[in-house]
Amino acid sequence: MAKKSVQSTSPSKAFTGDTVVRFDEVSFEWGPNKPILDEVSFNVRRGTKVTIMGQNGAGKTTLFGLILGAEHSGNSTEGNPRANAAASGAAPSHGGYKPESGEIHIAQGATVATARQVIPRDQLELTVREFFANCFAEKMYDIDPRIDSVLEVVNLKTAKAGAKGVVDVKDRIVKTFSGGQQARLLLASALIQDPDILLLDEPTNNLDKAGIEHLTQFLIDYKKTCLVISHDADFLNAFTHGVLYLDVHTKKVEQYVGDYHDVVEQISARIEKENMDNARREKEIAEKKYQAGLFAQKGGQMRLVAKRMREKAEELEEEIVEVRKEDRTIKPFKIPAQPELIGDIISIKSYSILNPETHKPVKRTCDVRLRRKNHLLLAGPNGIGKSTLLERIVNGVEGITILPGTRIGYYRQDFSMMDFNDTVYQSLEKVIRSVEGRLIETELRAAAASFLIGADAIHTKIASLSEGQKGLVAFARLVLQRPGLLILDEPTNHINFRHIPVIAKALDEYEGAMILVSHVPEFVEQIRIDEVLDLGKGY
């Protein structure tokens, strides 16, 4: 039975008027049998701010890559499979892609810059000056004043150059910055290019409250075109003019008016109406077919009536629309705790923070002891040293004692606890073998399925997954690992908002010792916290 796909065509100031970005029936795939977009059409008006929504893996970041590809192809790309670098698993040097078919148009002369989700690994060893220099195709002379200017815009507070023992921020190595500070560097790397079209990919990840507030106000005041990928509804609602929704099932893009919450309501209302209309049509189809069968048995002229009945039923079948499936949510899950641990699983007697003025380490003492069912929240502003302390805990440095035999489940911000060259299957297999000493196939596949890792994704390399999909794989690993000490560093980064309550419930019910870092208060409120260690207290 053929089905029609229905898209929203409601006008919005974000999608009408002076067009700066236009997609005309664009299709794109990541290699054979991995379609991402299917004959997608939309336009974005100059000077508007548009939200990109969609399930993890729907192609939101790929959409940005296609826009970048259009800019680097002279403001227009026409589908050319042979020119598509994604088919070979590699992207062009500018990070852009070409569509398989259709055309992408960027307004003549318009420039594009993107603030990516994470800093590429091969750039972490660069100095800040080198990092910004890489943003330009040609050597930029006298770049230092421009760096200082954009760092001020993104509110990246740095120690004053010339202060005793303090290194100029532009000479600091990128990897020495915290996750929140790196998020600011990413935004600054886009702004320093002074683009006409600004692409922001999960810009609030790792940002503390002050950082999000600063970014929000910046975007409210921003006069140029901006497309934003984010799962933070409150952040988006402050400035959004319209929404482009990427449907992971139909591979289409739907245009909606309003903010994040408006779109969720519109989608729900549409789904309900389409389901009701389809139910009415299917009932009528069944009646027509039943009547056709009766008339056909009577023979004679009744056969013609039966034929008309069957034709009407076929017409109604053609009118049945393909209802947009709601985003799938991960199944409720439990992270089993290592059972045999007795007493203090971890003891923290001292730790170091970074002085926000001098960026020099300051040693502090404390008395933190965690046993089974003890949950600790590690708090403090960006750059104070939260992630550094987590790394020190894992490495067992002086001042920190971990009960021998404790399995540590570590969820890193950058997912570096996983080998990016492994497939998902190989990554999960390693965890099972480390715990059980053997492969348990059914357990592996059950864990994968719980986190929406299907047969097509399970043999995909970790490096090829979206950041949100990497996060789901990381949780599947924790389930299989059954840790005695669970350490989580911003576990909601990149994760679809529909999954957040499920994850929060699992952490709330975790019965081992847990240390959590999160700048999302709505998430933390859903989790039992027994103790808070605020590294920023006193500054």
Image: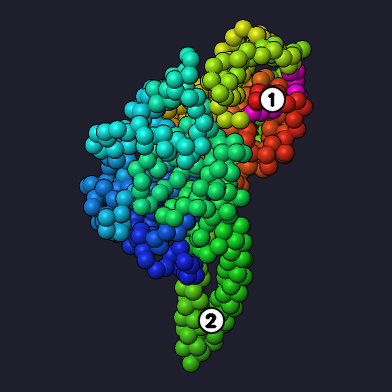
In this rendering, the answer to whether 290 lies above or below 300 is above
In the rendered structure, find residue 292 and report the number of the disc placed on it.
Answer: 2
Residue 408: image quadrant is top right
> What span is in magenta?
370-380
- Residue 96, position as x, y percentages in the image: 31, 44
Image quarter (top left, top right, bottom left or bottom right) of the C terminus = top right
Q: Which amino acid, by three-letter code, is at mark 1?
A: Lys
On the question of residue 350 being in view, the answer is yes
Q: Is residue 210 left or right of residue 218?
A: right
Identified at 66% across, 28% down, the residue is 379
Q: Nearer the viewer, residue 283 or 309?
A: 283
Q: Is residue 189 left or right of residue 53?
A: left
- Residue 494, position as x, y percentages in the image: 53, 40
Magenta residue check for 377: yes
Q: Is residue 467 left or right of residue 97?
A: right
Residue 514: image quadrant is top right
Q: Which amino acid, by three-letter code, is at mark 2?
A: Ala
Counting residues from the start of the chain, the first of labels 1 and 2 encountered is 2
On the question of residue 476 being in view, the answer is no
In this rendering, the answer to whether 525 lies above or below 339 is below
Q: Is residue 100 left or right of residue 338?
A: left
Label 1 sits on residue: 537
Q: Alpha-carbon distance for marks 1 and 2?
A: 79 Å
